[in-house]
Amino acid sequence: MIPIDSISVVNPRVRNPKIHQTITDSIEEIGLKRPITLRRMNHESGEASYALICGQGRLESCRMLGQTEIAALIVDVDEETGHVMSLVENVARRAPRADESLEQVRSLRNRGYSDSEIGAKLGYKISWVQNVVTLLERGEKRLLIATEAGHIPLNLAVSISRSSDSEAQQLLLDAYESGEIKGRKVLAVRRILEQRMRNGKQGRTSISSGSNKPPMSPEDLAELYQQDTAKHRLIQKKAEHTQEALLLAQQIFKELFSNDEFRELLTAEKLTSIPKPLAELAHREGFFP
């Protein structure tokens, strides 16, 4: 336990007020879950003083709550190393912290804690814990990481995990049409669904079992890259072929619609309804009044 007044923030950064308030509320409700990291500083007066390496938000929250001491890990490093460690911690914070959250839930579940107890310890609602456990048990690591990254709502991820591939596609479409997910998030979820269809759910993150698959060698990675490149080339060729076919069909109908006899024949046969894209083409080209 280190006096807060003896800690200096030598590499401060601007904080998101909403996120910081969440940290403060969590500390006030259930206490500090992880100690901050400090390094010792040389002080001419002989008084102990410390420089913060990581944990600025937790330190500021404890100060706001009127606490005078904070739990800390002390590392014996020089100023330059401490500065680098602080920069690395700040950069790493920007990445999704899914693995850490999942490991906490998995560890507490293996110790026999209930979902409500896990939620109380981690500062989450019981519904969040239950959904995470569901995805863990189904081996849905991709969906969990996407949820932590903010690409997909947790309830939608759970629904997808319980659905077939075709049903999952429909869920994505429904979520897009309802505005639940928009823009780039739709593309991110679509990639996840394609990976699940191609490679399976990869249930190696199950609560009861770990991964025994050996790491990939450089040769394996090169082969995988070549396979993905070949697939993308095939997709590009199919797209180009489809575009050429559509342009050809468009030109054919354009010439047919410009023929008076053909239009009279359609009217005589009462074939007056046509697909919307063709109708728009006809009106755009002035074939119909």
Image: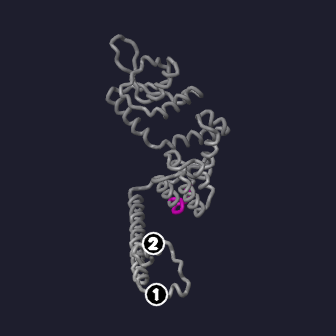
- Residue 188 drawn at (x, y percent): 47, 54
| Residue 24's disc number | none
Numbered disc 2: secondary structure = helix
Mark 1 closeness class: few <14, some 14–19, many ≥20 residues within 10 Å: few
- Residue 65 drawn at (x, y percent): 52, 21
Amino acid at circle 1 = Phe
Q: What's the distance in space between the residues labelled 1 and 2, CA to CA?
A: 18 Å
**Which residue is at 43% across, 74% downward?**
283
Residue 210 lies left or right of residue 216; in this view the side is right
Seen as rendered, the residue at the extreme top is 45
Numbered disc 1: secondary structure = helix
Counting residues from the start of the chain, the first of labels 1 and 2 encountered is 1
Amino acid at circle 2 = Glu
The span shown in magenta is 195-202
Q: In the figure, 68 relative to 225: above or below?
A: above
The mark total stands at 2
- What residue is pinned by disc 2? 280
- What residue is pinned by disc 1? 262
Discs 1, 2 touching: Cβ within 8 Å = no
